[in-house]
Image: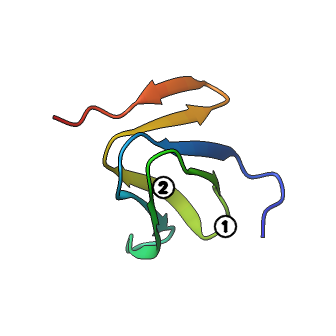
Amino acid sequence: MDQNGEYIIVKAKAQGVQVIGLTRGQDTKFHHTEKLDKGELLICQFTDHTSAIKIRGKATVMTKYGTIDTEVE
């Protein structure tokens, strides 16, 4: 695993927030899913296998570039 990969923190602002890891390579596929309850945190790392992270639900995402809230109606 790449020990120098970037990290993000996802904080659930509602019940049932989904965090989905997507693979690298020619075909992008889901490889891991977590479900968070309100107030829970998940620390995620981009690695040799994870090229993207998809977030479904109301959450705050913290990165070295700043903090952003998802826009869920």
The numbered mark at residue 48 is 1
Residue drawn where x is 61% and y is 43% of the image: 9
SS for dot 1: loop
Between the C-alphas of marks 1 and 2, the distance is: 11 Å
Residue 3 percent coordinates (x, y): 84, 59
Decide if residue 73 is on the left or right side of residue 66.
left
Q: Quadrant of residue 27?
A: bottom left
Residue 56 percent coordinates (x, y): 31, 52
Name the image colouring: rainbow
Q: Residues within 10 Å of mark 2 (few under 14, many from 20)?
A: some
Residue 6 in the image: above or below residue 17: above
Decide if residue 67 is on the left or right side of residue 69.
right
The numbered mark at residue 58 is none
For the C terminus, which image quadrant?
Answer: top left
Residue 55 in the image: above or below residue 27: above
Residue 26 in the image: above or below residue 59: below
SS for dot 2: strand
For the N terminus, which image quadrant?
Answer: bottom right
Residue drawn where x is 42% and y is 72% of the image: 26
Q: How many marks?
A: 2
- Residue type highlighted by circle 1: Asp
Q: Farthest residue to the top: give it.
A: 66
- Residue type highlighted by circle 2: Ala
Q: Residues within 10 Å of mark 1 (few under 14, many from 20)?
A: few
The numbered mark at residue 52 is 2
Residue drawn where x is 38% and y is 74% of the image: 29
Decide if residue 65 is on the left or right side of residue 5.
left
